[in-house]
Image (tube, rainbow, N blue to C red):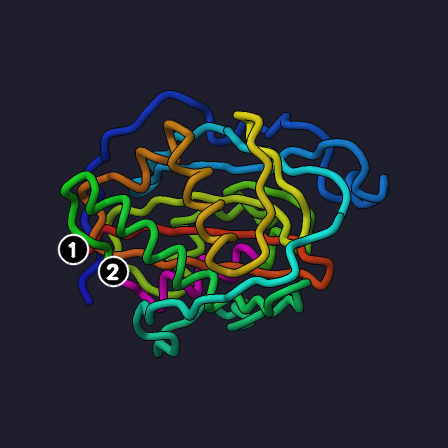
């Protein structure tokens, strides 16, 4: 494959992608406090084209204690997104993770496919073409979510100094434009949005809804989702043993 041409810069918004989130205590601090009080649900948006980076921190918020839930919950099956076993994968992609929820079993693949569906629904509402599911891009996304969970951070640059475009280039070079949205939340906990609404993610469908709505309610996350130049994308979700969720959505513009 030919080496990529220097990417053109996509429309971007103000903000600093290197700025550290300051949205309340870290996930580990929240755990140490027994999940008492309010911990913000963190989201980070990054709009990338080649090495040109912009982004901001925004976020709905996450709440306190586990309490009584409804006695009956029906978990829907996600629509198949596309190829889940591509030839090209990130070496740090574990492929899957699970969490045994109070009323439904969560698998990373189910949440990923629901997020992909809901992002394309939002794009259709704005007369934009659907993103094609890209299993390789999803693998890169998933590897980043796993790294964030393991290292206890939320952001676009990992501890090795790699950004989204760098991580993709460890696998291939067919994207000339690249973008990223990142989020952290929990399942089986009450989640309070910045608007004061309280949500409980009891199924993969509800969790995906919360992730996409959180991104759509933030200017820069929304801009990344509704960028017309993207033609494919991949979602990578990691579920921890205690119900913490890290999600990465990478966007790709091919040559």
Tell me if 59 is positioned left or right of 126 in this view.
right
Marks 1,2: beta carbons within 8 A: yes
Residue 226 higher or lower than 159, as above or below: above
Residue 247 higher or lower than 49, as above or below: below
Quadrant in the picture for residue 134: bottom left
Which residue is nearer to you in this view: 222 or 209? 209
Helix or strand or loop: what does disc 1 sit on? loop
Q: Main secondary structure of the magenta part?
A: helix
The residue under the point 63% across, 65% down is 103
The residue under the point 74% across, 51% down is 68
Magenta span of residues: 132-145
The residue under the point 73% across, 58% down is 242
Which residue is nearer to you in this view: 121 or 93? 121
Q: Does the magenta-highlighted stretch encompass residue 142?
A: yes
Which residue is nearer to you in this view: 182 or 218? 218
Residue 73 pos. (x, y %): 56, 62
Residue 218's tag is: none
Q: Residues within 10 Å of mark 2 (few under 14, many from 20)?
A: some
Residue 174's tag is: 2
- Judging by the rendered image, the residue that carries numbered circle 1 is 255
Q: Quadrant of the N terminus?
A: bottom left
Which mark is first along the chain, 2 or 1? 2
Residue 25 higher or lower than 179, as above or below: above
Tell me if 31 is positioned left or right of 140 in this view.
right
Residue 89 pos. (x, y %): 42, 71
Residue 37 pos. (x, y %): 78, 32
């Amino acid at each position: 494959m030919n080496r990529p041409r220097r990417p053109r810069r996509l429309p971007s918004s103000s903000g600093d992608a290197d700025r550290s989130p300051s949205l309340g205590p870290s996930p580990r601090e929240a755990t140490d406090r027994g999940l008492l009080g309010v911990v913000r649900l963190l989201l980070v948006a990054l709009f990338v084209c080649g090495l040109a980076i912009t982004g901001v921190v925004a976020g709905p918020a996450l709440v306190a204690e586990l309490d009584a839930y409804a006695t009956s919950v029906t978990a829907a099956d996600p629509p198949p997104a596309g190829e889940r076993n591509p030839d090209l994968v990130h070496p740090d992609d574990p492929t899957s993770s699970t969490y045994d929820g109070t009323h439904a079993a969560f698998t990373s693949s189910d949440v990923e496919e629901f997020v992909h569906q809901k992002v394309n629904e939002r794009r259709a509402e704005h007369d934009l073409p659907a993103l094609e599911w890209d299993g390789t891009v999803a693998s890169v996304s998933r590897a980043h979510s796993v790294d964030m969970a393991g290292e206890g951070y939320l952001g676009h640059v990992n501890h090795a100094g790699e950004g989204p475009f760098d991580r993709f280039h460890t696998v291939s070079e067919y994207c000339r434009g690249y973008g990223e949205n990142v989020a952290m939340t929990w399942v089986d906990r009450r989640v309070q949005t910045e608007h004061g609404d309280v949500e409980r993610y009891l199924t993969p469908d509800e969790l995906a809804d919360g992730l996409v709505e959180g991104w759509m309610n933030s200017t820069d996350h929304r801009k990344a989702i509704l960028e017309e130049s993207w033609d494919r994308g991949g979602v990578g979700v990691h579920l921890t043993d205690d119900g913490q969720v890290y999600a990465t959505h990478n966007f790709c513009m091919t040559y």
